[in-house]
């Protein structure tokens, strides 16, 4: 009797394991085949407090948009991809504003907070004593959907040419990266947070060096 009971327990255990394995495979299959729609996120920025002192003077900021920044057929900016469990692109991650404008606005906010009179110009005047040109902007946020979690891979890169008294004195190469594994899914708010934190990190790299160079003028 005991032996039969033991065999019954073993059989039930094996059956439960098979059912669990089947459910995992089913979820994985459904995740891989499910249709995902495009998602739009809001790109925002707010300067963080920093001890840069109160500086004076005018700074002109301009930008050259990179060809790598893409729009879809509706004219929306593509900043990443939403991928299925196999890593196959299912949909686009879209921005409500151009990435170039997002980066430029953040830099203008930071310069103003540091005390400068900062303004954007499509073509900085030749007589400008302090000018910045943002170029080679590249950004992506890829979300890879797993069975029970997601992986996010993000990178923001751009270069800044620093011009003083009409002459380029230095080029700064700025890069920030972020990889995360999140349970179940990445919400819209989490995606927006990843993008915002990367831009904050980029500004913390560039603004202190700009202040030092401008004060040497």
Image: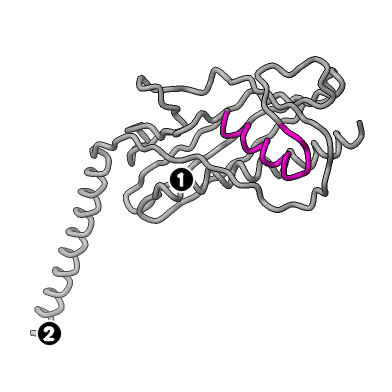
Left or right: 86 as drawn, with respect to 64 = left
Q: Which residues are magenta?
A: 101-118
Q: Quadrant of residue 215?
A: top right
**Residue bearing mark 1:** 191
Q: Is residue 178 left or right of residue 213?
A: left
Marker disc for residue 2: 2
Tell me whether the residue at label 2 lies in contact with that at label 1, contact meaning CB atoms closer than 8 angstroms: no
- Whether the magenta-drawn stretch holds residue 179 is answered as no
Question: Residue extending furthest right?
Answer: 216
Residue 94, percent from left and from top: 41, 33
Within the image, what quadrant is residue 56 found in? Answer: top right
The Cα atoms of the two marked residues, 2 and 1, are separated by 56 Å
Q: Looking at the picture, tell me which residue is in the foreground, 140 or 179.
A: 140
**Measuring 28% from the left and 37% from the top, which residue is drawn there?**
36
In the image, what residue occupies the spot 57% across and 30% down?
A: 101
Residue 32, image x and y in percent?
Answer: 27, 40
Residue 106 in percent (x, y) is at 63, 38
Look at the picture and state if 161 lies above or below 24. Answer: above
Label 2 element class: helix
Is the residue marked by circle 1 packed among few (<14), some (14-19), or many (20+) residues within 10 Å?
some
* Magenta-colored segment: predominant secondary structure: helix
Q: Nearer the viewer, residue 26 or 184?
A: 184
Sequence-first tag of 2 and 1:
2
- Horizontally, residue 110 falls left or right of residue 143, namely right
176 or 13: nearer the viewer: 176
């Amino acid at each position: 009797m005991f032996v039969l009971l033991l065999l019954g327990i073993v059989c039930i255990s094996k059956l439960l394991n098979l059912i669990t394995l089947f459910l995992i495979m089913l979820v994985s299959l459904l995740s891989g085949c499910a249709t995902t729609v495009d998602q739009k996120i809001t790109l925002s920025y707010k300067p963080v407090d920093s001890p840069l002192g109160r500086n004076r003077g005018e700074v002109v900021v301009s930008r050259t948009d990179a060809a790598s920044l893409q729009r879809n057929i509706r004219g929306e900016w593509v900043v990443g991809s939403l991928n299925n469990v196999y890593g196959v692109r299912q949909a686009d991650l879209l921005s409500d504003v151009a990435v170039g404008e997002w980066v430029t606005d953040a830099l203008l906010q930071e310069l103003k907070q540091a005390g400068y009179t900062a303004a954007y110009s499509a073509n900085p005047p030749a007589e400008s004593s302090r000018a910045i040109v943002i170029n080679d902007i590249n950004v992506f946020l890829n979300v890879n959907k797993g069975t029970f979690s997601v992986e996010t891979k993000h990178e923001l890169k751009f270069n800044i040419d620093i011009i003083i008294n009409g002459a380029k004195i230095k080029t700064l190469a700025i890069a920030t990266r972020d990889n995360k594994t999140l349970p179940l899914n990445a919400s819209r708010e989490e995606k927006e947070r990843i993008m915002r934190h990367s831009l904050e990190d980029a500004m913390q790299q560039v603004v202190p060096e700009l202040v030092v160079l401008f004060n040497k003028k």
